[in-house]
Amino acid sequence: MTASRLTVVIVDDSALYRQMLMNVLRRVEGVEVVGTAADGAEAVARVRDLRPDVITLDVAMPTMDGIAVLKALRRAGSTTRAIMVSSLTGANDPTTVEALLEGAFDHVQKPAGLEPHLAREAIRLSLAEKLQAVRAAMRHPGIAAVSADTVGGPLAWRSDLPYDAIAIGTSTGGPEALRTLVPGLPAGMPVPAFVVQHMPAMFTPTLAARLDELSSVRVRHAAAGMPVEPGGVYVAPGGRHLRLERTERGVACMIDDSAPRLGCRPSFDTLLESMVPIYGRRMVAVVLTGMGCDGLAGCRRLRDAGGLVIAQSPETCAVYGMPKAVVDDSLASAVLPLRAIAAALAQQPPTGGQPSTSDRTSSAT
């Protein structure tokens, strides 16, 4: 990418849709379409030869589908970001979540049921937003593709963990990061874990189900009143806030539709702020890849209570936004590569001291 342009290859088996996307992207400032591909095999060749910053990638294509393209690009070590643009990225379809788990940067649904001019404008606005996120991510030097491999080697939980609960927050690039972290947690986890992934409601049940299939720990889609049990991983439902409350029978998940915070619902801040009164200093927050600063306010409250914060290292983030916010505010007890976080949680959690207010910056953006 040069300072003035973001290079894009359009991948779709429909000639009509390829032309429509070309016309749409011509109207997005700072974007240059450098090639097209009609199937997955051609897409892999175009990425190899043209090295674009981004590909817009359909899912259902002849020869090689979009999921296979993502796997091939990862094997080749490509740094090209993929934005899924497909009619299959809709409600109750697992392919979008699978694509995100395989490393797609983000997704856009092909508009359905709209007049042609309205459909073109809808997809232009959506693509412009996603491409702007790519541009912001690429401004940070050293950003690398996140491997979907789990942490190697046998792990077991130490018997004297310094915390009683784990909170994990993530946004853009999160599904792939979660695919590394959650399956990397060894069986027999003695504490509960809670996940906030910024994702629409239609996708989070599939995300929880796929993580459950891949993991030794039990992963559930959180529901109102669900009791919290040691060893369970609870994924916040998309479009709703997850809070915890102490009840007569123990701790339970609570779901609400209160206003978004920082444009986010579910909000990592909301989850953390509900957990601190319950667990106090005996909890750890893990801030993974994502745009913005959701989690910053919650991590401040957690660190004031004496708890721990782990931030994902910049070179393993798809977008170094959320982790950067807590690092810049001197809240991180440790900054670790993604593949090291599960081992740190199980074997050697950080024990960094409480930072003083004077040590923190005021740049909460």
Image (spheres, rainbow, N blue to C red):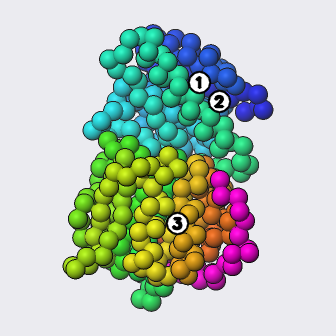
Q: Quick check: can you spot residue 216? A: no
| Comparing labels 3 and 2, the label whose residue is closer to the camera | 3
Disc nearer the start of the sequence (1/2): 1
Q: Which residue is mark 3?
A: 298
Furthest residue toward right: 3
Location of residue 100 with respect to 297 vertically, above or below: above
Label for residue 9?
1
Q: Residue at x 38, y 43 (%)?
A: 200
Relative to 356, is 319 on the left or the right?
A: left
Location of residue 143 with respect to 356 vertically, above or below: above
The local crowd at label 3, few if under 14, some if 14 to 19, many if 20 or more residues have their Cα within 10 Å, is many
Q: Which residue is mark 2?
A: 52
Q: Amino acid at mark 1?
A: Val
Per the image, label 1 sits on a secondary structure element best described as strand
Q: Is residue 86 magenta?
A: no
Residue range of the region highlighted in magenta in the rendering: 344-365
Q: Residue at x 43, y 57 (%)?
A: 196
Q: Are marks 1 and 2 in contact (CB under 8 Å)?
A: yes
Q: Amino acid at mark 2?
A: Pro
Q: Quick check: can you spot residue 124? A: yes
Name the foreground residue: 261 vs 160. 261
Q: Amino acid at mark 3?
A: Gly
Disc nearer the start of the sequence (3/1): 1
Q: Tell me the distance, in whole angstroms, between the alpha carbons under discs 1 and 2.
A: 6 Å
Query: Quarter of the image holding residue 297?
Result: bottom right
Per the image, label 2 sits on a secondary structure element best described as loop
Location of residue 4 with respect to 348 vertically, above or below: above
